Amino acid sequence: MQQDQLQSLLAVLADGEYHSGSELGELLGVSRAAVWKHLQKLSELGIELDSSRGRGYCLPGGLELLSGAKIVECMGANAELLSLEILPLVDSTNTRLMSRAEQLPSGFVCVAEQQSAGRGRRGRAWVSPFARNLYFSLLWRFEGGAAELEGLSLAVGVCIAEALESLGIDGVSLKWPNDVLADGKKLAGILLEMSGDPAGACHLVIGVGINVDMASMQALDIDQPWIDVASLARAQGLAPISRNTLCARVLRNLWELLDEYPERGFAFWRERWMARAAYLNRSVRLVTSSQQTHGTLLGVDTSGALRLATDTGEQLVYGGEVSLRPES
Ligand code: BTN
């Protein structure tokens, strides 16, 4: 099915009302049989469709599609600097920006309704069903190489947590180095990738995935405890949160972060990270491929390194392929 026909079909059904097969056929300029095939494709994408004899087809509860106009409107300050691309389907927004990093302007953002090969940290897949969550990447150019980026991924977590809090969500915490949690479960993930000269002009791609309204069927593929914004909002008595508004809020915060990061560094963000630190002063286990270290989590230093109190004294951990777990 052609992507533009899929988009047109969804744009009509997004209102959550019933539309007859002939109405949809007329809108798309195709036969009713072709409409039926297109609707089947929606089901394959995991989009729940209701059909009723005599009334037609509807998406129960409607669907909020991504909208560049809404994102720009909600972003307010700096929106004019934003180059935004919205795609119905991409392999991975990070892969797309990494492969075009030389050509695209700094500040370019790619947002997708669905990723066919979404990537997480440590070689994991990032489950990315259609129109349920947020998947986007932002490209930024730095002149001073990797040294300027120390601690940046932690500060990105602060941007996401503060965006969620600005929409009324409570209880978001940050697990070192860059997991965003609620209720001890994964709410959002951050994937930073760099290309260019590690000692000079380089491109950074910041990939953000936020579980907004994950359908349980699609979540069967997630290999860790997870939670989404919709269930937090429900539990906290809030109205559903718009993906466009959330995307705009995170982008606004990221802009503030990136614009000044070479001058401010992580030290400027440290307290905000510490205020949300998961497992602070608790016993944790730091796991690498070859060893486990036990200790008490003291937080992070001004460079973003993890401070761990162990039997042999305080250890600083600077990142890499490590994972942090609470001792049960
Ligand atoms: C993690 O494992 O915690 C990081 C997940 C990052 C997922 C996002 S979704 C948008 C961007 N594109 C990708 O392929 N990955 C990142």
Image (cartoon, rainbow, N blue to C red):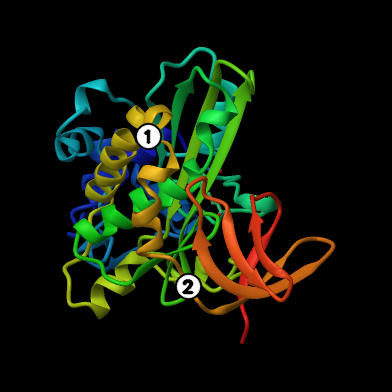
Q: In the rendered image, which quarter is residue 161 located in? A: bottom left
Depth check, front residue: 310 or 279 = 310
Q: Identify the disc placed on residue 44.
A: none
The percent position of residue 279, horizontal first and vertical second, equals 50, 74
Query: Which amino acid, mark 1?
Result: Arg
The percent position of residue 208, horizontal first and vertical second, equals 45, 46
The percent position of residue 201, horizontal first and vertical second, equals 55, 15
Q: Residue at x 32, y 72 (%)?
A: 171
Structural crowding at the residue carrying mark 2, measured as other residues with C-alpha within 10 Å and reported as few (<14), some (14–19) or many (≥20): some
List the single residue furthest toward the top: 103
Q: In the rendered image, which quarter is residue 81 located in? A: top left
Q: Which residue is mark 2?
A: 280
Q: Which residue is mark 1?
A: 264
Does residue 123 sit above or below 280 in this rendering?
A: above
Q: How many numbered tags mark residues here?
A: 2
Residue at disc 2, secondary structure: loop
Q: Residue at x 51, y 44 (%)?
A: 151
**Structural distance between the alpha carbons of marks 1 and 2:** 24 Å
Structural crowding at the residue carrying mark 1, measured as other residues with C-alpha within 10 Å and reported as few (<14), some (14–19) or many (≥20): few
Q: Tell whether label 2 touches label 1 (CB within 8 Å).
A: no
Query: Which amino acid, mark 2?
Result: Leu
Q: Residue at x 64, y 50 (%)?
A: 318
Does residue 274 sit above or below 195 in this rendering?
A: below
Q: Residue at x 31, y 39 (%)?
A: 251
